[in-house]
Amino acid sequence: MKVAVLKGGSSLERQVSLHSGARVEDALAALGHEVIPIDADGGLVRRLRGERPDVAFIALHGPGGEDGTPQELLEILGIPYTGPGVASCIRCMDKVLAKHLMREAGIPTPDWVAFNSTAFRGLGAADALEEIEDRLGFPLVIKPAAQGSALGVRFAGSRDDVPEALVSAFSYDDRVLLERHVAGRELAVSLLDGEPLPIVEIRPREEDRFNYEARYEIGRTDYLCPADLADDVATSVRDAASRTYEALGCAGFARVDLMLDAEGRPEVLEANAIPGLTDTSLLPMAADASGLPFEQLVSRIIELALERRGVSAVPSS
Amino acid sequence: MRRLVIVAVLRHTSPMPEPQDRAAETGPSQAHRRSHQTARDLERYADLFAQRTRVMRSSAMRDLMAITARPEIISLAGGLPDTSTFPPETFAAQMTRIAQESAAEALQYGPTEGFAETKAAIRDVMEAEGMHPDDEDIIVTTGGQQALDLVAKTLVDPGDVVICEGPTYPGAVPVFCSYEAETHQVSMDDEGMRVDELESLMDRLGAEGRKPKFIYSVPSFQNPAGVTLSLERRRRLVELARTREVLLVEDSPYGLLRYEGEPQVPLYQLDGGDYVIYVGTLSKILSPGIRLGWAVAPPPVMEKIALGKQATDLCTSTLAQYFAVEYFAEGRWRSYVDSLCDIYRSRRDAMLDALERHFPQQASWTRPAGGLFVWATLPDYIDTSDLLAKALRENVAFVPGAAAYVDGRQGSNAMRLNFSGSGEDEIREGIRRIGAVVDEQVALYETITAEHTIPAASAEARGSGADVLPLRRSRPSKS
């Protein structure tokens, strides 16, 4: 089968995407597929038209990759693609929209307030900051609405930290959210075709928080998979993740990031439409723990993409 | 197979924020085919890594810098000299002569310390700055970077103290880190390193019974700060090294790239070579691609450095040395350096003009008399790593200041701007775009804080000892 691997692009997560893409290409080649690596740039549509792949594997991360943009183009070209569809990508990429949908579905997610920069420039939102701070309490988390990989995420320990953190977050997106900080254990649940894979717990070794750098470096963070959780806690975590997957209309796969608070209650932070597939990524780790090695994971993801389009999986040549 | 994995991981975490390996990233996947790994495999590798890899710094910045290689981006982030004016005919003639006259030798191994002819060329360069080293004190290295690495390899045990400038050359940070040095940084002003601060730091260390192994400095047209160490401080620094018996590592890649004023006397010359290790390079006056640098060190130190080099790569590229020797034999190297100075002077002027025009009044920047870089400082509430993300959307890039600090935390409101690698129009446009994103952030901050400060009434409350919120830094609003 001819599989185009879309990777790179111009988002800030380009490097991570190149690593995800390279790894997927290796697996596809080992499975006997014809691999067409494509760096997603201005020539993307032309390349896809020329190559006419049977399916596109989207290994793009961040805005311009998992926000529905390439998905929309692939819909127009009639090429089946991996992962969630356009609408679901839009819902996941926009953390604010995702949180509203979770709230509506009764899924626990930390309290938040979101603004765009116009609210500050034109509507005097700064006047409301104190009320917001009082309501959410400190420390609070300030982050851009649309950015993966923890880029631009700041913790504000006190009021004095807030303006600077807002300026930082606004560097990545025109909309930011202020969110109540949940102290506790950091968990990630990857789902494949809606089924939760073993839960991963993320334990940073050195830094006090899970930052961008530790996330992609071996040896900087400890991952426990499956996470050591009491049965009832694990069930409620999986349940929250499944409901999030459903509420956001995900398909194929997704990863849901949660915090487990001191009382053992899960709070969902966000869902990632195209989770990382690098050597240190959590979806491959969880799949592996469930007995699905990377090649088989990739193979299954392709099958799901074809099924969704009503194309039956052609045995590889 | 395992080795490939480790190489891949290290490449990803390589900390030099210089964007040059786009081809390597996007090349055909067949070129670096490796079988898939499971999480368990990776855990196994993680246990194999040496302790020192734990302190090798990597960064989000590195990933951001990779994006700056996109062709539509005006990159003021590099440190690249302009190699476009080197005459191709000269290049061709030299290589032809080497092929015709010395093919076998040029393709052979050479001595670890380098060829005598290469050293003669190096002496020419050093004499142009008033230094007269002995041949046997010189070792030819694979770029100045290797010289720096070998010096650290020779002198630093884990936990040893190294002192450098703050900010320091970003490429020195991973070197000190990989030998697990405890690096201290001494701040700088318009006259370069604050030697008084250095002295009190050494006093403090001395009180704990500790002494630095060496002090690292780029005294002329420092990378990244663009400032030059004054003569008075040079004398004090050398004096300090002699009385306290500490080595000084003088890294001087830009000494001959002076665009105005009189040359400063090198530390090596002031000291006579007893306590100064001099590190030089042909990268900025001929070509970084030939990877030729050198170190000059006192004989006992040199002996160890040579042993270290033997272990690292046996010898510096013979072909590159032949090329350099041919080039210097032609005798026109000074005029080529002069032509580079003319180009860079105009580019520096274009950058300084553009900064004046487009950067807000809250920003300040250095005015280098030579070298390749301007260091700009923004209001302290702007984090330049985040600002870079915004700048990249406007297709312009710079190096965030944190790259020049070992702890990666200081310098967060500063940036390094390179003026040697872009044309004047590009520089003007690049600075205009950066100025625009800075303006936006300044205005946003002012909006947030101006509305958000406690009104005058709260002063009363404070007086009464009531529960009061801390005052924010407030800035006058523009509007």
Image (spheres, coloured by chain):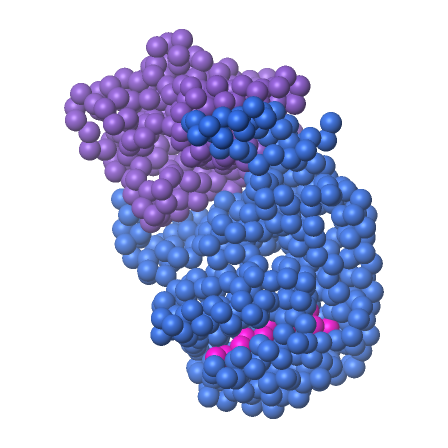
Chain colours: A purple, B blue
Q: How many marks?
A: 0
> Which of the image's four quarters has the N terminus of chain A?
top left
Q: Position of residue B280 (x, y in %)?
A: 62, 75
Q: Is residue B71 above or below residue B253?
A: above
Q: Position of residue B222 (x, y in %)?
A: 64, 65
Decide which of B229, B92 is in the foreground and name it: B229
Decide which of A287, B249 is in the foreground and name it: B249
Decide which of B430, B185 is in the foreground and name it: B185
> Which of the image's four quarters has the C terminus of chain A?
top left
The quarter holding residue B229 reads: bottom right
The single residue placed furthest to the front in the displayed view is: B464
Please report the residue visible at 40 percent of the width from the left and 25 percent of the height from the top. A137
Please report the residue visible at 73 percent of the width from the left and 43 percent of the height from the top. B361
Q: Is residue B113 visible?
A: no
Q: Is residue B397 magenta?
A: no
Please report the residue visible at 34 percent of the width from the left and 54 percent of the height from the top. B2
Q: Seen in the image, is A75 located left or right of residue B117? A: left
Q: Is residue B247 magenta?
A: yes
Q: Position of residue A125 (x, y in %)?
A: 58, 19
Q: Seen in the image, is B272 located left or right of residue A284? A: right
Q: Seen in the image, is B207 located left or right of residue A3? A: left
Q: Seen in the image, is B247 located left or right of residue A192? A: right
The single residue placed furthest to the left in the displayed view is: A231
First to last magenta residue range? B246-256
Please report the residue visible at 57 percent of the width from the left and 20 percent of the height from the top. A127
Decide which of B144, B325 is in the foreground and name it: B144
Q: Position of residue A144 (x, y in %)?
A: 52, 28
Q: Is residue B449 visible?
A: yes
Q: Is residue A261 above or below residue A41?
A: above
